[in-house]
Image (cartoon, rainbow, N blue to C red):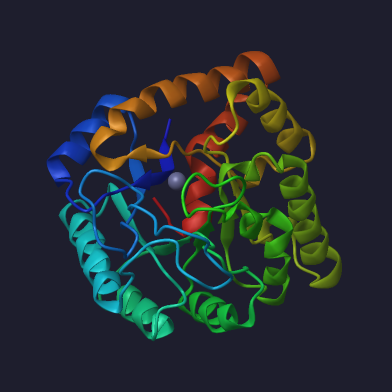
C-alpha cells in the first residue's frame, strides 16, 4: 500500500540519510516535508522562542522573521528534495507578510522546484485582503497550500486566527487546492461543515463534478485519541473519504515514529469504522496524489 505522510516538519539541520532511514523504517513511501519557519533558525525545535509581551493583530510572534531567512529555508528544503525527489516533497513554510512574499513564492516554485506551501496564520486572518495575491499566485502556479487549522501550540495566542471558517474565503479562488490540518481540532465539526460548503459550491454553483472539490482535510493529530475515532467516522459518514490525507506531524529526523501512526490509523479505519481496503488506500496515500496533482 502506498503511504504518503502529508505533514512532516524540518528544523533545518536534517540530513537526507536520516530522513530516508526513518521513512524506510516506518514504511513511508513519500513525505511532504515543510521547511523551517523563516525566523532565526533554532536547530533543535520547530518553534523558535517567542517575543515577550502582548502580540497585536499583524504583529509577529517570533523575532527576526526576514526575507533572507525565507530564502534560506527554501534553499534548504529544495536541496533535501533534490537529493531524493521521488521520496521527499518539499513545501515552503511561507510567511506571507514578508515583503515580496509573492515573488519569493514564485521563485521557490519555478526555480527551486518547491511543490507546495505550508502556512500558519500568526496574528493575521486567512481572509485578510493582503492574502489574495498569495492565493492568486499559488492558484496560477498550480501548487497546493496546507494550512494549520485548530488550536495552535506555538505562535502565542494565535488559535483564533486558525478557525476553519476563516478559510471560507478560498471559495473565491476556485482552482486553488488546499488542506486544513489536524481536522481543525477542536473545531472538527466546523471543519467538516466547511468541507460540505466547498462540496456544494463546487457542484451546485461552479457546475463541476464531485472529483473537483479543492478542499482536502489533513487528518494529522491534533485530535487526541478519544476524539479521533469519532472525527474520522464523521468525515467518512459525511462523504469526505476522497479528501482525507494521512499525516503525522513527525520531525524529519524522527520519521520512524510514523510507524505507530500508520498502525493506529489503519486499525481505526479497518477494525473500528470498518471501511473497505480501497478507502484505507485512499486515505493513506492515493488522495495525497490528487492533492499534489501528481501521478505515480
Ligand atoms: Zn505541524
Nearest to the observer: residue 218 or residue 66: 66
The image position of residue 124, as x and y in percent, is 58, 69
The image position of residue 110, as x and y in percent, is 32, 78
The image position of residue 221, as x and y in percent, is 53, 34
In this view, the residue farthest toward the top is 271
Say above or below: 221 vs 11. above
Q: Residue at x 75, y 46 (%)?
A: 192
The image position of residue 159, as x and y in percent, is 60, 52
Taking the image as shown, residue 49 lies to the left or right of residue 160, namely: left
Q: Residue at x 39, y 85 (%)?
A: 99
Taking the image as shown, residue 237 lies to the left or right of residue 135, namely: right
Question: Quarter of the image holding residue 82?
Answer: bottom left
Q: Residue at x 14, y 46 (%)?
A: 15
Task: Indicate the quadrant containing the N terminus: top left, top right, bottom left or bottom right.
Answer: top left
Tally the numbered discs. Answer: 0
Nearest to the observer: residue 217 or residue 175: 217
Say above or below: 102 vs 221. below
Q: Residue at x 26, y 62 (%)?
A: 40
Nearest to the observer: residue 77 or residue 292: 77
Taking the image as shown, residue 88 lies to the left or right of residue 167, namely: left
Say above or below: 116 vs 241. below
In this view, the residue farthest toward the front is 53
Nearest to the observer: residue 41 or residue 79: 41
Amino acid at each position: 500500500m502506498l503511504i504518503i505522510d502529508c505533514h512532516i516538519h524540518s528544523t533545518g539541520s536534517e540530513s537526507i540519510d536520516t530522513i530516508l532511514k526513518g521513512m524506510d523504517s516506518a514504511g513511508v513511501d513519500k513525505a511532504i516535508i515543510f521547511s523551517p519557519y523563516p525566523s532565526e533558525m533554532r536547530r533543535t525545535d520547530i518553534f523558535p522562542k517567542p517575543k515577550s509581551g502582548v502580540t497585536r493583530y499583524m504583529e509577529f510572534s517570533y523575532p527576526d522573521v526576514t526575507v533572507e531567512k525565507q530564502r534560506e529555508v527554501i534553499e534548504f528544503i529544495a536541496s533535501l528534495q533534490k537529493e531524493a525527489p521521488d521520496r521527499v516533497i518539499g513545501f515552503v513554510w511561507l510567511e506571507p507578510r514578508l515583503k515580496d512574499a509573492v515573488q519569493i513564492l514564485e521563485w521557490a516554485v519555478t526555480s527551486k522546484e518547491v511543490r507546495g506551501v505550508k502556512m500558519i496564520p500568526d496574528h493575521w486572518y486567512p481572509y485578510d485582503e493582503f492574502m489574495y495575491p498569495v492565493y492568486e499566485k499559488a492558484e496560477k502556479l498550480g501548487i497546493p497550500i496546507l494550512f494549520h487549522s485548530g488550536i495552535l501550540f506555538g505562535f502565542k495566542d494565535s488559535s483564533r486566527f486558525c478557525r476553519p471558517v476563516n478559510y471560507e474565503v478560498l471559495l473565491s479562488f476556485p482552482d486553488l487546492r488546499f488542506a486544513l490540518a489536524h481536522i481543525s481540532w477542536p473545531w472538527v465539526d466546523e471543519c467538516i461543515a466547511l468541507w460540505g460548503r466547498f462540496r456544494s459550491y463546487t457542484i451546485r454553483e461552479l457546475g463541476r463534478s464531485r472529483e473537483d472539490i479543492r478542499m482536502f482535510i489533513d487528518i494529522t493529530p491534533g485530535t487526541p485519541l478519544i476524539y479521533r475515532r469519532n472525527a474520522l467516522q464523521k468525515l467518512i459518514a459525511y462523504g469526505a473519504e476522497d479528501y482525507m490525507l494521512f499525516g503525522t506531524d513527525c520531525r524529519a529526523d524522527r520519521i520512524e515514529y510514523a510507524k505507530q501512526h500508520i498502525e493506529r490509523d489503519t486499525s481505526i479505519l479497518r477494525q473500528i469504522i470498518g471501511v473497505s481496503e480501497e478507502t484505507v488506500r485512499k486515505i493513506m496515500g492515493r488522495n495525497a496524489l490528487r492533492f499534489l496533482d501528481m501521478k505515480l
